[in-house]
Amino acid sequence: MAEKSSYPVVVIGLGRFGTALALELTRRGTEVLAIDRRPKVVQALAGQITQLASADSTDLEALKQLGVPDFYRAVVAIGGDLEASILTTSLLVELEINDIWAKAVTVQHGQILRRIGAHHVVFPEHDMGERVAHLVSGRMLDFMQVDEGFALAKTHPPKEYVGMPLGSSNLRRKYGVTIVAVKSPDERFTYATADTELSYGDIIIVSGPTEDVERFAELP
Ligand code: ADP
């Protein structure tokens, strides 16, 4: 059987998100069939993506003609047109595509997509907004919510933990977080151990419950 990551992918909707996704999959060696109802958008990507088609994805016959039923994995990257997003997703369910990903713009949109059978729902605008809020308003250099209520953050070490081996810092008991990796200026990230001593100017990766990570990253 083919490697999970090498299954060809149908990307439907070539707005900013769908285009970036299709181009990145192509760059990573995944075969892509990209579909959009706007011929101009499709023409603009000619030569950059393995297979391109201009079609209306709410038309079952069109999907069949393009060979969509043979694909294991599909991504519905239509955001603005709710009706088209929902109809397209339901047709992919009807075609028994094994792994359907759909982009949602609102929580309600996401709930509908899940109810009709999307296997994964992503909220790119919402997630990016949340991430940027952490970067804009605090000291974090990067932030990622890896699961509901659990996060990873890239930040600088708080003053109170500089010059002390992590093993004797009581960090998990006091703040509920774990420092997983450390990077000194001009070096690469390495795993943090009990013997690691942080310095001013280091960058650390912290993991833990989201609120604990947020609280820890705000320490001076
Ligand atoms: P983004 O915010 O990522 O730019 P949009 O929702 O604005 O996403 O873009 C969605 C894309 O999906 C557009 O290029 C649009 O032409 C395409 N699209 C919308 N409805 C259909 C449909 N029924 N069939 C095929 N493509 C569609």
Image: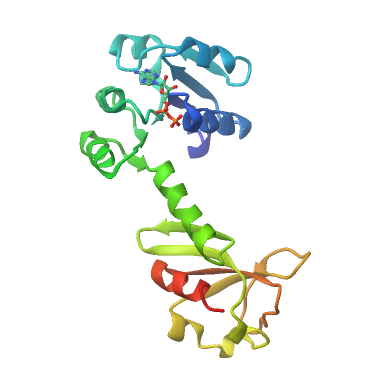
Taking 86 as reference, is 148 left or right?
right
Near-viewer residue (184 or 38): 38
Residue 13 in percent (x, y) is at 42, 24
* Residue at the limit of the structure toward the bottom, as seen here: 168
On screen, 92 above or below 216? above
Give the image location of residue 167, x and y in percent.
58, 87
Instruction: Find residue 23 and report its image quarter.
Output: top right
Seen in the picture, residue 104 relative to 191 is either above or below; the reply is above
Q: Quadrant of the C terminus?
A: bottom right
Give percent across and percent down for residue 157: 61, 76
Q: Nearer the viewer, residue 154 or 61?
A: 154
> Ligand 1 appears in which quadrant?
top left
Looking at the rendering, which quadrant does residue 90 occupy? top left
Q: Position of residue 130 (x, y in %)?
A: 43, 53
Callout count: 0
Q: Is residue 126 left or right of residue 21?
A: left
Q: Is residue 57 left or right of residue 22?
A: left
119 relative to 160, above or below: above
Classify residue 150 by image quadrant. Answer: bottom left
User: What residue is shown at x 62% (from left), y 78% (from top)?
Assistant: 193
Residue occupying image coordinates x 78% and y 64%: 186
Q: Is residue 88 above or below residue 200?
A: above
